[in-house]
Image (cartoon, rainbow, N blue to C red):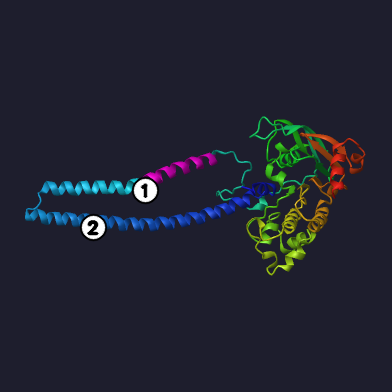
């Protein structure tokens, strides 16, 4: 579940659906193999049971012929033994399977009744089509939040955003700063359509994002989060997540621009190096540059950076920041940052506090506000730097 935001942000629902289908087919094959083995075992047990029963009948008949047992006793013994033995043997297994089937059926029905966020393209024969079917119009990237009020569905009583108004021009770089819990990450999640809103609207190029096709819309957005989630597989596969049909030259160019090609080439297997589950075999800076490379490969109109360098050491941060600077060129960029030194050169800084934008301007303008929140945060950070 932790990778669901990455899947949605890169509009790879179809890719994951196809991969899930292959996994299901594999699971069905294993289940059928297990069922055949269980059936053979059941045949063996039944054969032994009936063999034993026939032996009892034969032995009873022999005793009956000698006069040691009468016919009624033999019939009663055989019938009671068969009924009781069969019932006891099958009761436990039958009950377990019945309860498991009922529980699984209820969960499957819940999933099937959920409304799908995106629609998978299918051909006339019912097969899902390739990723190339998605070919929406490229956006310019002008973003506007219009009096947006928002609270998370699980916390109806807590207002996270309280009338946000924000305009980001096409190609502009805007930073969102402020204390934890101010609503910075919520702005990005709303922009990605991870949640709906009840009051206000979010528009891109003058059109409400909730009126746009979700897949076509998200094709224009790339996300570089603080905690990069790489998929278990190779570096090549993780970079290709930004554009599954890219060729080798495009992958290498994306890695070069992300300042990742140097460390990739140092690995014996290069792009085919396995990163491990969640990328555990790579350092934080390396994982971050892989995420930047897949964002470069996607070539988005809108770039979202969620504290992309906050968890890195100084040396890694410098390399990653250089890659981010290349990535942001010519794109509408929204940057969430706690380290104010990384956002000094953006076009506009918006300071959020308590779900509202309390200050807005350039670094120089905000630094002149003696009692301003940005000035306080700036002094606090740079004094301890």
- Judging by the rendered image, the residue that carries numbered circle 2 is 51
Q: Position of residue 95 (x, y in %)?
A: 37, 44
| Relative depth, front residue between 65 and 173 | 65
Tell me which numbered mark, 1 or 2, is placed earlier along the sequence. Answer: 2
Badge 1 element: helix
Provide the residue span drawn in magenta.
94-112
Classify 87 as above or below 326: above
| Residue at 57% in and 48% down | 124
Badge 2: how crowded within 10 Å, few (<14), some, or many (20+)?
Answer: few
In the rendered image, the residue lying farthest to the bottom is 268
Along the horizontal axis of the image, is 17 left or right of 45?
Answer: right
Classify 249 as above or below 196: below
- On whether residue 11 falls in the magenta region, the answer is no
Q: Quadrant of residue 49?
A: bottom left
Q: Position of residue 75 (x, y in %)?
A: 15, 48
Q: Is residue 288 visible?
A: yes
Q: Position of residue 263 (x, y in %)?
A: 75, 64
Question: Marks 1 and 2: which is nearer the front?
Answer: 1
| Residue at 70% in and 52% down | 228
Please tell me the numbered disc located at residue 93: 1
């Amino acid at each position: 579940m932790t990778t669901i935001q990455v899947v949605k942000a890169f509009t790879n629902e179809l890719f994951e659906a196809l991969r899930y289908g292959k996994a299901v087919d594999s699971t069905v094959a294993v289940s059928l193999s297990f069922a055949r083995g269980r059936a053979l075992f059941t045949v063996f047990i039944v054969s032994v049971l009936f063999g034993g029963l026939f032996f009892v009948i034969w032995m009873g008949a022999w005793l009956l012929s000698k006069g040691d047992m009468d016919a009624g006793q033999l019939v009663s013994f055989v019938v009671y033994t068969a009924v009781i033995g069969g019932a006891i043997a099958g009761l436990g297994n039958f009950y377990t399977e019945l309860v498991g089937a009922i529980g699984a059926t209820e969960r499957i029905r819940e999933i099937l009744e959920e409304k799908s966020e995106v629609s998978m393209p299918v051909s006339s024969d019912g097969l899902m089509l390739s990723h190339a079917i998605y070919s929406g119009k490229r956006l310019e990237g002008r973003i506007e939040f219009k009096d947006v009020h928002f609270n998370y569905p699980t916390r109806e009583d807590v207002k996270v955003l309280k009338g946000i108004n924000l305009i980001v021009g096409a190609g502009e770089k805007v930073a969102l700063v402020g204390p934890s819990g101010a609503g910075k990450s919520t702005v990005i999640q709303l922009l990605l359509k991870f949640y709906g809103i009840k009051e206000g609207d979010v528009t891109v190029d003058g059109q409400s994002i909730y009126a746009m096709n979700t897949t076509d819309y998200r094709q224009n957005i790339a996300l570089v989060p603080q905690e990069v989630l790489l998929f278990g597989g190779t570096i090549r596969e993780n970079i290709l997540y930004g554009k599954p049909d890219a060729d080798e030259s495009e992958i290498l160019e994306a890695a070069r621009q992300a300042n990742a090609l140097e460390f990739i080439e140092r690995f014996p297997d290069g792009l085919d190096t396995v990163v491990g589950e969640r990328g555990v075999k790579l350092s934080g800076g390396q994982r971050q540059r892989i995420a930047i490379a897949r964002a470069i490969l996607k070539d988005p109109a809108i770039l979202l950076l969620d504290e992309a360098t906050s968890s890195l050491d100084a040396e890694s941060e410098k390399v990653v920041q250089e890659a981010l600077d290349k990535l942001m060129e010519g794109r509408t960029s929204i940057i969430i940052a706690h380290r104010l030194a990384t956002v000094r050169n953006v076009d506009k800084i918006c300071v959020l506090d308590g779900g509202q934008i309390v200050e807005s301007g350039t670094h120089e303008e905000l630094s002149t506000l003696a009692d301003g929140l940005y000035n306080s945060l700036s002094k606090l950070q740079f004094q301890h730097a």
